[in-house]
Amino acid sequence: MGGMILYAHVLINGKENLASLTTIGSPPGFESEPGLQKLAPVVRLAKFLPWPVETVWRMLAPFYVSFKLNLPFAPAYWPNMHKNAGPDVFYNAAELLPVDAAEHFLLWSTEGHAWQMMGGQVNVETQLHRIDLPILVIAGKADPLTPVPRVERFFERLQARDKQLRIVSRANRNVADYSHLDLVWGRDSEVDVFRAVVRWLAAHPFDGGAQVEVIEHPQ
């Protein structure tokens, strides 16, 4: 969701004080995904009982790892997950979206509503092509939230001259066809994902005259 917020921020507030953009597994729009509709009862309940629902959500998070589940909003290719991404990590990371945001996600992804912000004043999805800042877009080959054809169409339409698309996959000499969560928690995310991010940031400092040193972390 951070990348989605970044896209919307640029379109609504402009690019002042931004040197470049980097997004990891961020949907550039929505298509009908009925699987997310299963979350509707949870969202409705959280609207009236936020704390109990949050507590139960956190308590159930370790089972997500233990049973290698694949939820519509948090898919993972489990053989590619880091050995340290255990139940304790998911317990600490489990946090419900704000109810208003969750309701919008459901509308956007399950009922074909437009991705709009500012009370409907800005249709983000139809304006994404206007982004002209240097941008690095990273997506997993097997991530159902960011289907490669959709990401490629979005990337081709971007007005930025300085842009890079990285599909993290075996075909591109990565260890696996990454899904969604393993883009961050993958056993080799440091090499397959974050090394590219660090190099991109170093190549696009905010001050054009600044020099940024990249230190490779020893394996």
Image (tube, rainbow, N blue to C red):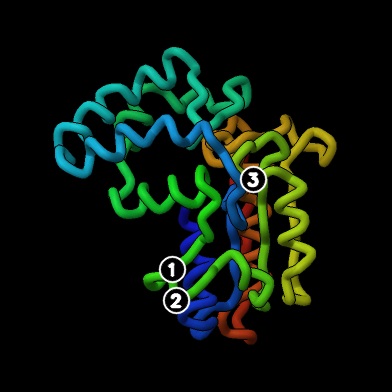
Which residue is at a point 59% across and 48% down the rendered structure image?
25
Q: Is residue 9 above or below residue 185?
A: below
Q: Label 3, secondary structure: give it.
A: loop
Disc 2: which residue:
121
Q: Earlier in the sequence, mark 2 or mark 3?
A: 2
CA separation, marks 1 and 3?
A: 20 Å
CA separation, marks 2 and 1?
A: 6 Å
Tell me, yes or no, whether the two marked residues, 2 and 1, touch with CB atoms within 8 Å. yes
Q: Earlier in the sequence, mark 1 or mark 3?
A: 1
Q: Position of residue 18 (x, y in %)?
A: 53, 78
Structural crowding at the residue carrying mark 3, measured as other residues with C-alpha within 10 Å and reported as few (<14), some (14–19) or many (≥20) = many
Task: Select label 2 or label 3 by which is in front.
Answer: 2
Q: Position of residue 172 (x, y in %)?
A: 82, 41
The residue under label 3 is which amino acid type? Thr
Report the side of 54 relative to 36 (left or right).
left
Q: In the displayed orientation, state which residue is furthest to the top.
A: 67
The residue under label 1 is which amino acid type? Met
Which mark is drawn over residue 146?
3
